[in-house]
Each structure stands twice: as C-alpha cells, then as structure tokens.
Amino acid sequence: MIDLPLRVGHATDDQLKSGVTVILPDSPAVASCHIAGGGPGTRETDLLSPENTVERIDAIVLSGGSAFGLAAADGVSAWLARKGRGFAVGEIRVPIVPAAILFDLRNGGDKSTIPGIGDGHLSPYALLGRKACQAASTKSAEGSLGAGAGAFLADVKGGFGAASASIGSGGTVAAFVAVNAAGSATYGGTHYLRAAAFERDGEFGGYGLPSPLPEHPNAIKTKPLAELGGNTTIAVIATNLPLTKAQLKRLAVTAHDGIALAVYPAHTPFDGDTIFALSTASGTEPAPLSDLSEAGALASATLARAIGRAVARARPAAGDPLPVWTNLCPHD
C-alpha cells in the first residue's frame, strides 16, 4: 500500500519484453529532477528546473523502449486531457507529463512492432502509457513488469521496485525505480546484494552482507562493451513534505546516492540515471531544512531498498540473457 495521495500503474507487453510505469498524483504535484548519468533519455525535464515557470506536474512516466518509449507520455497526456487535467492556458488544459526512458531493445523480446526495428508504423508505447493509467492503483506490484519488464544489470535481471519510509516529523518518503544499470547489483555475482545494508524485514532474502567480503569486492563489472550504449536507472522519489521546487531539486540530487549504494559502478557515461522528486503536499509553507536533510538521507536509503526489491522480485522469461537473482541464492 502506498501511504501517499498518488497511484502507480503498470502496463507490460510480454512479447515485446518491455513496458511502461506511470506515477499519478491525485492532484498536480510540485516536482523537480536531477540527471547524474551520461546518457539520459528524457522529456520535459528542463521544465522542472527551479527557475522555470510551471510548478506542478500531472504525472511522471518511466518507460522502456529507449527513445521510442518517450511516446508513452503521449498516451498518458491524452488520458489526462480527457480527465480535464493539465496546466491551464485560457480555456485549454495541457497535461504536464515529464518522462524518462531506459534502453531494453536488446533483451530478447520481439521488437517487430517498433518502427525502424520491425515493421511497426507507430510506437507501441503510447498505448502502453494509456493502459498504465487505466491500471493505476494505490498498490504497486514489483519485479518484471512496467518499465522494469525487460531490465538487466551486468550480473542479474533488473526490474521495478518500490519502498517507503517514515520521517521523524510524520512525513513519508517513497521510492519507485526501474533498474537497468550498466553496473552490478551483487558482490562478485554472488547472492549478496549491495543494497543489503538497507534491507528491512528480510525484504530481499535476509542474507545480509558477505562475511568475509570477497577477495575483490569492488572489482568493476559492467555489461559487455557492445551493450554499453543502453542502460539506465530511472526513479521517482515522492513525499508528502511541503517542499518547494528548489528543495525537491536538492532531494533528487541527494537521492542519487541510493543508486550508488545499490549498484556499482553507478552514474557511468553509459547510464542515463534520472531521478524525479515530487511533493504531494497541498500547503505553501516550505518544510524546514532539517526535514529536507532527513528526507534526503531516507530517499537515498529507500531508493537503495527499492533497487534491491526490484532485483529480488524479477521473474525469468524466455530469451533472458542473464539469470534472475533468486537463481543465485542457496536452495534447501
């Protein structure tokens, strides 16, 4: 259950081995973002800079499909427009739908419906975006679905994950992530996850950290050079703290530490790591800096947990180039 006034929707095309995830706040939410990878694919992120005019967004889209996946935001925008949502320009309403994509075009799925790859004439992602809106609910499934349906890291299959934590002042921080990084989620290809230090209630196996550490715990392992053109961890940090656009920018910057805590190496020239941060608060009085500081620390820890959960809940599918994490775990 998501303890915030927003819904999460997924649409997955199993044959395509790709999909779309949409974050739908119940009402327009203040938002910003930060990009720390060298190869991002995004839409409307400049609008989220603190110095720019529009304060609130109507939805955020995370999608597979590389640049073709940006069309998912078209489907979401059309769905929102029919609901009467959007930035008012006279009598016209224009939905504000920032988006980020990950590269999953070489994951074994049938891409014949994507123009330029197969015989398709229109990107299938606009339809998936609309379906994700229709499926949105206050409960978010995890694993191999939505934007994480065809995601992989260097060592195991990736996926979509979600986690949340409470702030001392009574607020909530939640993280939603699709992880498809160039780096590794494990120590040396073992069943020990790098995010283990942040695990709660055995949410990804309860194995803890390796003891002793492997001989070369920080040996760099990334996807083969031929695959390095397409990776990314894309995420949304949501909170009910009343944060300004500038404060949300700082929250997004800080949250990137969560990627580095769960994936190594992170933020490479081949990753498009993008994090959005949004506030569902209706008040106008900004939160104190002490709350922002605590929210930033929790955002990075919660994002690390969400990445661990994404990997732990990935499911195998035909044609997968790498195993799921559960295949690496000890079996009785």
Image (tube, rainbow, N blue to C red):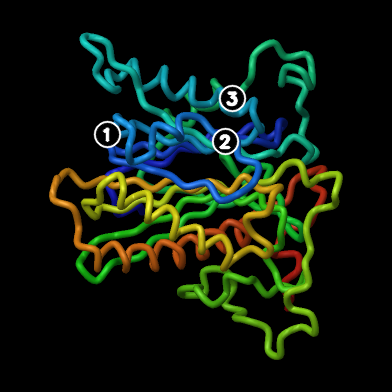
Determine which residue is flagged by label 3: 125
* Label 1 secondary element: loop
Q: Amino acid at mark 1?
A: Pro
Residue located at (59% from left, 66% from top)? 262
Indicate whether 291 appears above or below 230: below
Percent position (x, y) of residue 126?
Answer: 54, 21
149 to the left or right of 78: right
Q: Measuring from the top left, give residue 101's x and y in whole percent.
A: 59, 36
Image quarter (top left, top right, bottom left or bottom right) of the N terminus: bottom left
Relative to 91, 303 lies left or right:
right
Q: Residue furthest front?
A: 51
Q: Residue at x 32, y 37 (%)?
A: 51
Q: Tell me the amino acid under the disc marked 2.
A: Ser
Question: What's the residue at 52%, 64% (across, down)?
Answer: 304
- Residue under label 2: 63
Q: Earlier in the sequence, mark 3 or mark 2?
A: 2
Q: CA distance from mark 1 to mark 2?
A: 21 Å
| Type of the residue with mark 3 | Tyr
